[in-house]
Each structure stands twice: as C-alpha cells, then as structure tokens.
Image (spheres, helix red, strand yellow):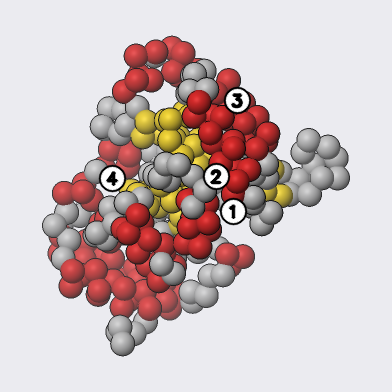
Amino acid sequence: AALDAGYNHFDHADIYGAGACETLFGEFLAENPSVRDAIILTSKCGIRFKDTPDPGAPARYDFRADYIVQSVEGSLRRLRTDRLDLLLLHRPDYLMDPREVAEAFAHLKASGKVRHFGVSNFRPSQVAMLQAVLPEPLLVNQVEINIHNIRAFEDGTLDQCQQLGMRPQAWCPLGGVAYPAWGNTFTPEDEARIAAELQRQASAYGTEPWIVALAWILKHPSGIVPIIGSTTPERIAAAGRALALDYSREDWYRLLEARNGHPVP
C-alpha cells in the first residue's frame, strides 16, 4: 500500500517487534528484489531491553562501537540487504563517547554497510557534540513532533536542523495517546478544545482533522518529514493529501492557541 501510494522511505529499528518487523520486511524484499534500489531504508540501534543478552541485565542504551556494528549486521541479516541507506542512533546513551561512535560509523561506512548517519531523540547539544567529531554531516534527527508535543519547536531542535541542513523527522506525528508517563498534562477539556479546532479547520479545508494535524507539522520551514505508521492502507494513501493542503499561517497559530489554551504572548 505504501509503495502504491508513492512512499519511498521505510523506517525500521532493531527493537521493533524484537526484530520481527525487519524480518518481515526482509521477506518482502527477497520476494521483490527490484524494490530495494527504489527505496530509502532506515534502521536504528542503541536500545537494549531488560534481561538481554543475560538475565538480570537492565534496560539500557548502548553506543559502544562493537555493539553499534553488531546491531547493524543483525539488521542487515533480517532485512536481507547488504546496506542501510540511513542508520539512526535511537535514543541518547548517557554514557556516549562520541569518538567511539565515530569509530563505529567510520567502519560501517568503509565496509559499505551504511551510506549515511543520523540520530533520533537527540537534543541540540548532543547533536553538536557528536557532529563535532564526524567527518560528514548527520542527515536526520527523528524526534516526537505533534500537536501534543511541541518541544522541538521550543528547545532549539528545529532551529538547529535549519542551521545545519539536517532533516527533522517526526515520529508519532498525529499525537497518538498523550501518555501520562511521558509528561502529558492535557485535561479532557484541553483535548476537547484541540479536537474542536481541528474539526473546524478540517471543515473549512474540506478534509479530515488528522490531515490538518499533519499539515500543521508540514508547515514548518525546516521540512519536517512525518513518519506515517498506520496499518490501514486507505489512511496510508490518504496521508499524502496533507502535502497538497494550502495551510495558512493564521490557522497554524489558531491550532497552537487551541493547544496551549491561550494566545501567544
């Protein structure tokens, strides 16, 4: 469905489905070998689950050079391909040594296993620290961006992307559930106010509220790329309508005001 709708970027991670997602996609590539050269294939590494590889091991992040290389090689086996177009470090490792990461990247680049590199969920200071020791630019910072989570607009992430020419990618672009464990402070009244403004704008534009929510993200001049994760073929195809929406600056700020519950200062 995604290929038929014109998508050419497929986003994976070694931990999605404990590797099963990459395995299934690899089976598809094996059955359709001509697809590989027509797509951009991304995977991520650096998150390790509790009790792996040994019982009692804690959940943790791991950017050691040997583990990054090991993770990529595992992804390549599961995806049945000889290279990744883009490798992202999934979440910042509190113990990250940028020079050790650079060592892993250099090995993966020289061996042809990874073409380009980026990060995910990195703060601007972490991007700057890593970029300072790399010979080539990081291409992507994939972070959560949606009407509930506007941190990237405020903490310098999108500013840095524009400054460095990085491409911001938005995971969970429709907001999904505003998880309390992730710092959600939205009340039912807040949610109703946001939903009402989305519906008002959707009616004005002749579309659906979720298309407006995507258009809101796409309006930013940094060129945010939403990661579309629907399991419904019709929605995968319909998401492209957000690109064609002539979404106004005024409506962008109206939705921000509905989200915040007050006008901008």
Q: Tell me the crowding category of disc 1: few under 14, some 14 to 19, or many 20 or more residues within 10 angstroms, Cα based.
A: some
Of callouts 4 and 3, the N-terminal one: 3
Q: How far apart are the two marked residues, 4 and 3, measured between alpha carbons? A: 33 Å
- Nearer to us of marks 4 and 1 is 1
Q: How far apart are the two marked residues, 4 and 1, measured between alpha carbons? A: 30 Å
Q: Relative to 179, is 237 above or below?
A: above
Can residue 25 be seen here? The reply is no
Q: Tell me the crowding category of disc 3: few under 14, some 14 to 19, or many 20 or more residues within 10 angstroms, Cα based.
A: some
**Amino acid type indicated by mark 4:** Ala
Label 1, on which residue?
92
- Nearer to us of marks 4 and 3 is 3
Residue depicted at 25% across the width and 74% down the height: 253
Quarter-of-image position of residue 199: bottom left
Label 2, on which residue?
89
Quarter-of-image position of residue 212: bottom left
> SS of the residue at dot 4?
loop
**Res 73 label:** 3
Residue depicted at 37% across the width and 82% down the height: 261
Q: Position of residue 185 (x, y in %)?
A: 52, 75
- Whether the residues at callouts 2 and 1 have beta carbons within 8 Å, the answer is yes
Residue depicted at 43% across the width and 12% down the height: 31
Q: Tell me the crowding category of disc 2: few under 14, some 14 to 19, or many 20 or more residues within 10 angstroms, Cα based.
A: many
**Amino acid type indicated by mark 3:** Glu
Q: How far apart are the two marked residues, 2 and 4, measured between alpha carbons? A: 27 Å
Q: How far apart are the two marked residues, 2 and 1, measured between alpha carbons? A: 7 Å
Label 4, on which residue?
239
Left or right: where does residue 261 sit relative to residue 129? Answer: left
> SS of the residue at dot 3?
helix
